[in-house]
Amino acid sequence: MHKRNIPLCLPLKTLSPEAALISYPNAIRLLPKLVLASDVFRQLSCYYRSIRCEFQLMGFVEREDENVFRVTELAINPQYVGITHADNDTLMFSDFLRELELRGKDIGNLRLQAHSHGMLESYFSCRDVDTICDSYACDWMISMVGNIRLDLKARLDIFEPVPLSISLPIFVESSLSEINAPVVSVEEKSAEEAAWLMQLLKQMRPGMEVAGEVFHG
Ligand SMILES: [Zn+2]
């Protein structure tokens, strides 16, 4: 939806260093930051630390003062998953959005797309960047990638009016002990964590290669 143009190969001569973000107070605002509400972080942490294969989910984002983007709640979209892929179930996606609206949610705030690389490294792959470029019909979107070691990375992509991609720092409204909590096995999970996992598993259509390989522990 947001086509990437191939740069023209003109014989440009460099007169100054390449583009860089300008920090406040020389910029018109502070640089953006991503803040995860405490419950959102606990839920995300439970998913990332527990599930071996790839998965994806979405989140409601509220914009606050000082360029803070705050994730207030997660929503889990229907998806097909495997060891190295997690694809949105596009046929079921409109039903997923309709259900959120029936529950009184503003789907215009569904601005976070998070996914896991499972046991693999956490980084935005070429395929991830293509997805960011092609899949969103909105003017800006936040993407997050992580893995089972809770190595999280986030970026803000602005599509209109000026296309721009910014790496985001992630902050958590949570205690240090929660952030550094050890990985727990399936049997050790609390009732709340088990309910969160059930919400995600309900939306996952695992491929044959991940049968029996979903959980860590
Ligand atoms: Zn990825």
Image (tube, rainbow, N blue to C red):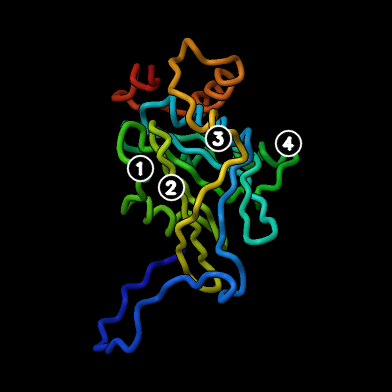
Q: Earlier in the sequence, mark 3 or mark 4?
A: 3
Residues under labels 4 and 2: Cα distance? 30 Å
Nearer the observer: mark 2 or 3; the answer is 2
Q: Quadrant of residue 211?
A: top left
Q: Indicate the quadrant containing the C terminus: top left, top right, bottom left or bottom right.
A: top left
Q: Earlier in the sequence, mark 1 or mark 3?
A: 3
Q: Is residue 49 left or right of residue 92?
A: left
Residues under labels 3 and 4: Cα distance? 14 Å
Q: Earlier in the sequence, mark 4 or mark 1?
A: 4
**Whether label 3 touches label 4, CB < 8 Å:** no
Nearer the observer: mark 4 or 1; the answer is 1
Q: Is residue 10 left or right of residue 118?
A: left
Identify the residue position indicated by label 2 in the image. Answer: 153
Q: Is residue 64 left or right of residue 40?
A: right
Residue 135 in percent (x, y) is at 46, 54
Residue 56 in percent (x, y) is at 46, 38
Amino acid carrying mark 2 in the image = Lys
Q: Outermost residue, right direction?
A: 104
Identify the residue position indicated by label 3 in the image. Answer: 76
Residues under labels 2 and 3: Cα distance? 19 Å
**Whether label 1 touches label 2, CB < 8 Å:** yes
Identify the residue position indicated by label 1 in the image. Answer: 122
Q: Nearer the viewer, residue 209 or 190?
A: 190
